[in-house]
Image: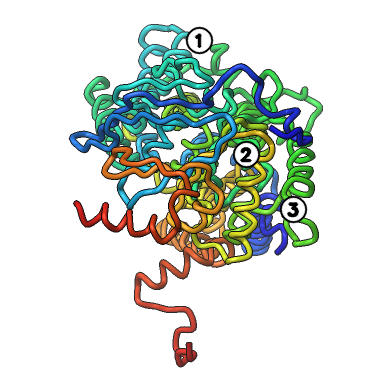
Amino acid sequence: MTETPDAAVAPAAGFRDIVRLEGVQKYFGSIHALRDIDLSIGRNEIVGLIGDNGAGKSTLIKVMTGVLAPTSGRIFIRDRAVDLGDYSVRMAHDLAIETVYQDKSLAEKQPLWRNFFVGRQITNRFGFIDIKRQKKIAEDILLNSIGFRGVGITVDSTVAQLSGGERQGIAIGRAMHYNSDLIVLDEPTVALAVKEVRKVLDFVRRIKESGRACVYIEHNLAHVHEVADRLVVLDRGRVVAEIAPRDMSVSALTEFLIDLQKAH
Amino acid sequence: MGRGTAGGIEGLPIILVFLCLLGLFMYTAPSVFLSPFIYTTFLSTLPPLVLLAVGLTYVIGAGEIDLSFPAIIAFSGFVFAVLFKEYQLGWIAVIAALAAGLLVGFVNGLLIAKVGLPSFIATLGTQFFWAGMATVLSGGKSYALRGAEDSSVWQVLVGRLDFGAGAPLWLNQISLQAVWTALIAAFLWLVLNRHRFGEHVLFIGDSNAVSRVVGIDVDREKIKLFTLMGGLAGLAAIFLTLENKNFFGNQGQGYLLTAIASVLIGGTSIFGGRATVIGTVFGCFIIGMLEAGLVASGLTGAWVRTVQGLIFLIAIIFYLTVEEPHRRAALMARFGFRRGFGRAKPAE
């Protein structure tokens, strides 16, 4: 690992995989959404998660990040098993795992400063929010980490006033701020203009450079092929292939997925 | 791209409407509205409405609805009246009535958050259940609380301020329930705008899905929300019963429309995600003032509901137009109207 300035705040040594799933199953009623998933995410690895609609990609990351509890199986974080009865979004945050969802990361009518801190507000011991401090930090993230200068967006702007690309920028900037070891991105380039897609891909590379890990769900194979170290293919709730991008071109990958669909 | 409506003075449009109406009534009924006694009367009659409406501000702000509070007023009012009058329990009656309200609210919360019923359905059901319960237990009787004003409960909760014999008469007619209600409303304003719970309520109203992924325990917060509403309705029941020195089974019925109207007139979004306690309080003032104002201006009481309903609709259309243009477009489209209605469709 090269010594970038960010590496100083990045993961503590002493573990191999940031997340490892073993034999994870997830049922929704009678629907078997995840079937016996074994998957590990290295501490400084970008893993692209691909597969058709309904293959289980979103369910998999929800299980990984504490939004959904698996029906059975084990989850290890930094090589240590977590108690699945306790595992929650808040616990994932505490374990430095952040998620940026396609369109569910920000609340529309709320100002940005609230969106940055909701779920982990800076409060006094009675639970009252330190608004001044939150706004100050939010402003710093907005101007310095995300680089929204002179575009008329302030910490008091509501999310509804932002474009799709700006929203991704805010959500990703928030994930960056919390110094996470693993950032999960759920289709961050959907509905973005080409220029904004570049920004998101640059961000994914920065995650790698700063010594962190990233799980990247993407429909656009060219985007994910470009940045991922490893591609994991899901099909009907199962991991059916793990591919190194250098071993397979984008067009060969496309063929592979089409064949997979035909086999249904 | 600016700061939008979030940066203005909270509740400003509704405060202006209130002042206009007040000015209008001062002009049409000067003998009533230029005397202080109409206002001290408001201070003794409005607190139950304000408590209910402030609680509903949270509920509607969270994208939910509570229709059960009129039944809580009946049920908690019954618990209070029977313990206070028949068993002479004084403050214990107050605590029991509050607990009854909290319990009903808690059950609402469980039905909504844990069983997963839509709040409209759940509270419609509990509304009938608890109102029926109050009727069964009271046997349809009303309870007159004669002599209640000698008790410490009455003096502390709904007594009158005492500035001494030298003070103007109206000053000594300010009721204590107004003081308590003002303190509670101020505290709940603070919680909504500055506390973690208030923020969670608004995020839940904005989107349950977003709230879950940012780590809000949506179920727990909803249970808290409905329990709070139940507690406020319980307190409203106590104030109402004490102020009237009487309990009767359907004493809560008149509040269903007026409380919801006060909240929505005040500017809290019917879609959730945005809520204003200050707007709600002024919404209550308007709703409360209309009755006295219309009657004093020479209209019959029968007009009151009509005008309340009209103002309610105008206010909602106003907020839809100003604050949620995309929702308005969707709503208009549903009824077959399009933006640019009546004009030729521009070339694509």
Residue at position x 66%, y 21% in the image: A12
Share a chain, discs 2 and 3?
yes
Mark 1 is surrounded, within 10 Å at the Cα level, by few (under 14), some (14 to 19) or many (20 or more) other residues, namely some
Q: Residues within 10 Å of mark 3 (few under 14, many from 20)?
A: many
Percent position of residue A191, x then y: 50, 62
**What amino acid does circle 3 point to?**
Thr
Asked whether residue A261 is in view, the answer is yes
Mark 3 — on which chain does it sit? Answer: A
Judge depth for marks 2 and 1 and give the one in front. 2
| Residue B321 screen position, x and y as percent | 54, 67
Element on which disc 2 rests? helix
User: Do circles 3 and 1 both sit on a common chain?
Assistant: no
Query: Which residue in the protein does label 1 denote?
Result: B91
- Please give the label number shown on residue A154: 3
Residue at image location 50% in from the left, 18% down from the top: A79
Q: Residue at x 68, y 54 (%)?
A: A157
Residue A105 falls left or right of residue A62 = right
